Amino acid sequence: MTPPVPARSEVWIADQVREAPAELRRQVLRDSAAITETDPLPDALAGAGWSALGRALARPSDRSVALDLLTADALITLALLAQAEEHPEDLGQFAERLVAVHSARA
């Protein structure tokens, strides 16, 4: 049986984090594993980033939140990069929307 071919977004994400520290790379790949080809990649990555941030905020005094914070940062950065590659003309609007979502959650 032929193994499944990775989705285009999965390959793109893996390529972006290939030089990241191993633990961070694994966490980013785990957190983005549910992204499908029908999901707009920038939005899906941002959603995964908000989830990682939510995990960190749920345990503010636990030292293990460092990986979740780094993962959230990486996923939001990847969301912005994906937006810049797919629709650079809308990057400013996308970034403003991310700030608005974050502000509404705070």
Image (cartoon, helix red, strand yellow):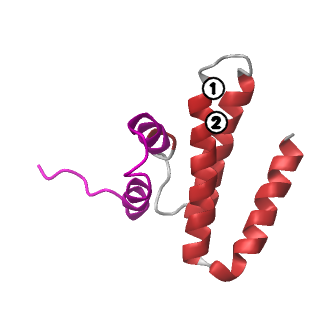
Q: Do the residues labelled 1 and 2 touch (CB within 8 Å)?
A: yes
Can you tell which mark lies on residue 69?
A: 2
Mark 2 element type: helix
Position of 7 relative to 58 (above/below): below
Q: Nearer the viewer, residue 38 or 90?
A: 90
Judged from this view, the residue extending furthest toward the top is 62
- State the image quarter where residue 43 is shown: bottom right
Magenta stretch holds residue 90: no
Amino acid type at mark 1? Val
Q: Give the range drawn in magenta.
A: 1-29
Q: Rate crowding at label 1 as few (under 14), some (14 to 19) or many (20 or more) other CA atoms within 10 Å.
A: some
Give percent across and percent down for residue 42: 60, 62
Amino acid type at mark 2? Leu
Which quadrant, please, contains the C terminus?
Answer: top right
Give percent across and percent down for residue 57: 74, 28
State the residue at coordinates (65%, 49%): 47
Position of 84 relative to 105 (above/below): below
Magenta stretch holds residue 27: yes
Judged from this view, the residue extending furthest toward the bottom is 89
State the residue at coordinates (36%, 59%): 11
Give percent across and percent down for residue 95: 75, 64
Mark 1 element type: helix
Label 1, on which residue? Answer: 65
